[in-house]
C-alpha cells in the first residue's frame, strides 16, 4: 500500500519557472526522502529530511516538512528541461528498513 | 552512476519460467534492498539483506526468493512467472542495516517482461 500521496499527479511548466510538488503521508515517520526517476531509469536520491527538521536546501531544491499536517513539499527553483522526470516521496518509520513510496509526480519542463 | 550494478537490464521470458536477477551493491555497502515497480502497484519493497542475513521482508511473493552472498552481491529469484510479474525490479544498497539517516542508492533496474 502507498504511504505517500503526491500532488499534483502531473505538472507542466515553462523552463525558468518554479515547480512545487506536494506529498502527504498517513502514519508517523522517521525520515522523508525525495527521489527523481528519469523515464525507465533508476531512482536518484535528491534529499532527505528528518522528522525533527522543517526545511532543507540543496542547490535549486528546497524541501519542507510539516509533521502536524503529515505533508512535505519539494520546490525546484529556476527549472530546466533536464528536470523533466518523475518525482517520488518516500517515508520510513524508523522501525524497519522499508521505504514506502508514493505514486509519483510527472514533471514536464518545456524549453 | 549510483555505483549499484544490476544485470540483466532487460529480459523477456515466458509464463511458468524462472529467472534470476543479479545485483552488486556500492563498494562498502552492506545492505541490499529489492524493490518492484509496476504500473498498478507502484514501487513496492520486497526484501532486504544485511551482511548476508535477511533483515526485512515486504510484499514478496512466495514464488520469489533472494539471497546475499559472502561477497555481498545479491540475487533475486523469480519462479513460476506470471504475466503480472512483468515489472521493473530495482536493487538498492546502503551502508547500514536500517534507514535512520541512511541514503539508499538505487541501481538502474532490470526490466522483466513475461509473455
Image: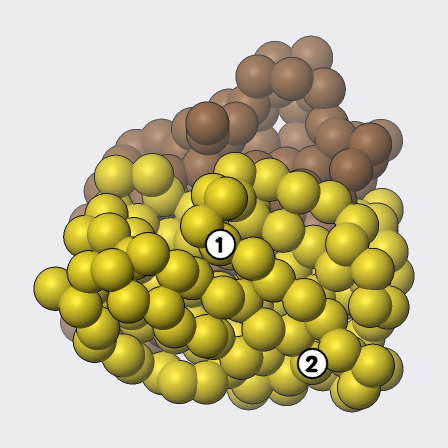
- In this rendering, would B13 be left or right of B46? left
Which chain is disc 1 placed on? B
Quarter of the view holding residue A91:
top right
Which residue is at the far top? A68
Q: Are marks 1 and 2 on the same chain?
A: yes
Which residue is at the far left? B115
Give how far across and how far down residue B82 sits, in percent: 24, 52
In terms of depth relative to the viewer, which is nearer, B12 or A16? B12
Q: Quadrant of the C terminus of chain A?
A: bottom left
Instruction: Decide: few, some or many residues near mark 2? Use Cα within 10 Å; few <14, some 14-19, many ≥20.
Output: many
- In this rendering, would B32 be left or right of A1? right
Q: Which residue does the image show at 69% across and 81% down from the upper left?
A: B73
Q: What residue sits right under mark 2 in the picture?
A: B73
- In this rendering, would B7 be left or right of A69? left
Q: Is residue B111 visible?
A: yes
Give how far across and how far down residue A93 sits, in percent: 75, 31
Q: Which mark is residue A6?
A: none
Q: Which residue does the image show at 79% across and 50% down from the upper left?
A: B55
Instruction: Decide: few, some or many residues near mark 1? Use Cα within 10 Å; few <14, some 14-19, many ≥20.
Output: some
Chain A's colour is brown
Sequence-wise, the earlier of marks 1 and 2 is 1
Q: Which mark is residue B64?
A: 1
Under circle 2, the secondary element is loop
Q: Which residue does the image show at 65% across and 74% down from the upper left?
A: B74
Give how far across and how far down residue A94 sits, in percent: 81, 35
Which chain is disc 2 placed on? B
Under circle 1, the secondary element is strand
Amino acid at each position: 500500500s502507498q504511504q505517500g500521496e503526491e500532488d499534483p499527479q502531473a505538472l507542466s511548466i515553462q523552463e525558468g519557472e518554479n515547480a512545487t510538488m506536494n506529498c502527504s503521508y498517513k502514519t508517523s515517520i522517521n525520515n522523508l526522502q525525495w527521489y527523481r526517476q528519469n523515464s525507465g531509469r533508476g531512482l536518484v536520491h535528491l534529499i532527505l529530511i528528518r522528522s525533527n527538521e522543517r526545511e532543507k536546501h540543496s542547490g535549486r531544491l528546497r524541501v519542507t516538512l510539516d509533521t502536524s499536517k503529515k505533508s512535505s513539499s519539494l520546490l525546484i527553483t529556476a527549472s530546466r528541461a533536464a528536470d523533466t522526470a518523475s518525482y517520488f516521496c518516500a517515508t520510513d518509520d524508523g522501525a524497519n528498513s522499508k521505504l514506502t513510496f508514493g505514486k509519483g509526480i510527472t514533471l514536464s519542463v518545456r524549453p | 552512476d549510483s555505483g549499484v550494478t544490476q544485470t540483466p537490464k532487460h529480459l523477456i521470458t515466458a509464463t511458468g519460467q524462472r529467472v534470476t536477477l543479479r545485483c552488486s551493491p556500492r563498494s562498502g555497502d552492506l545492505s541490499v534492498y529489492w524493490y518492484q515497480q509496476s504500473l498498478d502497484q507502484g514501487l513496492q519493497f520486497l526484501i532486504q539483506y544485511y551482511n548476508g542475513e535477511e533483515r526485512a521482508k515486504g510484499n514478496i511473493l512466495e514464488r520469489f526468493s533472494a539471497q546475499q552472498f559472502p561477497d555481498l552481491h545479491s540475487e533475486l529469484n523469480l519462479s513460476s512467472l506470471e504475466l503480472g510479474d512483468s515489472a521493473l525490479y530495482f536493487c538498492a544498497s546502503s551502508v547500514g542495516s536500517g534507514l535512520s539517516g541512511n541514503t539508499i542508492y538505487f541501481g538502474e533496474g532490470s526490466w522483466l517482461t513475461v509473455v
